[in-house]
Image (spheres, rainbow, N blue to C red):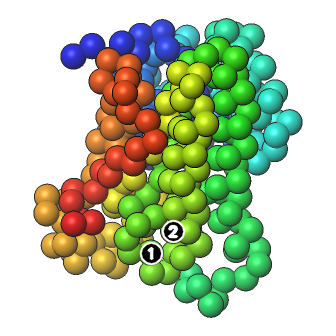
Amino acid sequence: MDLALQNKIVAITGCNGGIGVAATISFLKEGAKVVGLYRESISKLSEIFTRISELGLNEKHFMPIEVDINSTTSIQEAIKKIIAEWGQIDVLVNNAGATLETPFLALNDDDFESIYVSNFSSLAKVSREVGKIMMRQKFGNIINVSSLVSERFGRGVSVYAAMKAAVNRLTEVMALEMGKKNIRVNAVCPGVVETSMSNALQERHGQMLIEQTPLRRFASPEEVAHSILFLSSEATASFITGSKLFIDGGIRL
């Protein structure tokens, strides 16, 4: 099925992570133009450039932009570059995030702030600034990458789980407020995904979690990416907004 994503302008935060790389490549395969929002060093995007070359994808359809997604000024400057180059933003994928596995009572103030910034406030700031563009365009699509722990599990990642629950509620309210301008907002909630971020979890509890999962395996980054593309497409999800899509193999059941 044609997802009708050809030449759509897609901005992805955290594009160098496991899900971010998979989403970037998946959108490029569909003919979209992807803005990879990254922080600090472009060397972090080496996997994306390698895969673009190996797959023979159009390298001109990928535009990396360095940005501090916790700085409104930096976000605004990045948006100006996107608009100057491609004129609009059709899809925003809020994928950036980080976790810290520490018992709740052992967390210090800096831990609280870091988890809050990484997983909620930066997402909210990017969504606010891109949302203003989409409201003027009178169209747009925002997909927030949340997590299964927003509703289940969460031991050792208490504040991360709380922030992902906040992302889910923000998703719903954004959908409510922005729908009148033809803007859809949804969230994907992956379970355990085979990325470097989950390596420690897999090593300690992998077999137990697989046994609790009806499909008896973990998700690949590509499976999460395909769910993001599904929600991004007007061909497949044009009447879906304010929803949470779980990609967890049924472990929440």
Q: In this view, does 15 lie to the left or right of 24?
A: right
Residue 19: image location, x then y, percent: 43, 44
Q: Which amino acid does label 1 sit on?
A: Gly
Please tell me whether mark 2 sits on a helix, a strand or a loop: helix
- Which residue occupies the foreground of this view, 127 or 182? 182
Residue 53: image location, x then y, percent: 43, 20
Q: Which residue lies most toward the right here?
A: 73
Q: Do the residues labelled 2 and 1 touch (CB within 8 Å)?
A: yes
Which residue sits at x=41%, y=10%? 6
- Position of the N terminus, as image quadrant, is top left
Residue 91: image location, x then y, percent: 53, 25
Q: How many marks?
A: 2
Which residue sits at x=64%, y=10%? 86
Question: In the rendered view, would you say 149 is above or below 24?
Answer: below
- Which residue occupies the foreground of this view, 58 or 23? 23
Which residue sits at x=40%, y=44%? 243
Question: In the rendered view, would you say 18 is above or below 215?
Answer: above
Residue 198 occupies quadrant: bottom left
Numbered circle sitting on residue 161: 2
Residue count near mark 2 (Cα–Cα under 10 Å), binned few <14, some 14–19, many ≥20: many
Q: How far apart are marks 2 and 1 (CA)?
A: 6 Å
Residue 41 visible at all: no
- Position of the C terminus, as image quadrant, is bottom left
Residue count near mark 1 (Cα–Cα under 10 Å), binned few <14, some 14–19, many ≥20: some
Q: Which amino acid does label 2 sit on?
A: Ala
Task: State which tag comes first along the sequence, 2 or 1.
Answer: 1
Q: Name the residue that disc number 1 marks.
A: 154
Please tell me whether mark 1 sits on a helix, a strand or a loop: loop
Residue 233: image location, x then y, percent: 38, 22
Which residue sits at x=65%, y=65%? 115
- Which residue occupies the foreground of this view, 131 or 110? 131
Q: Which residue lies most toward the bottom here?
A: 105
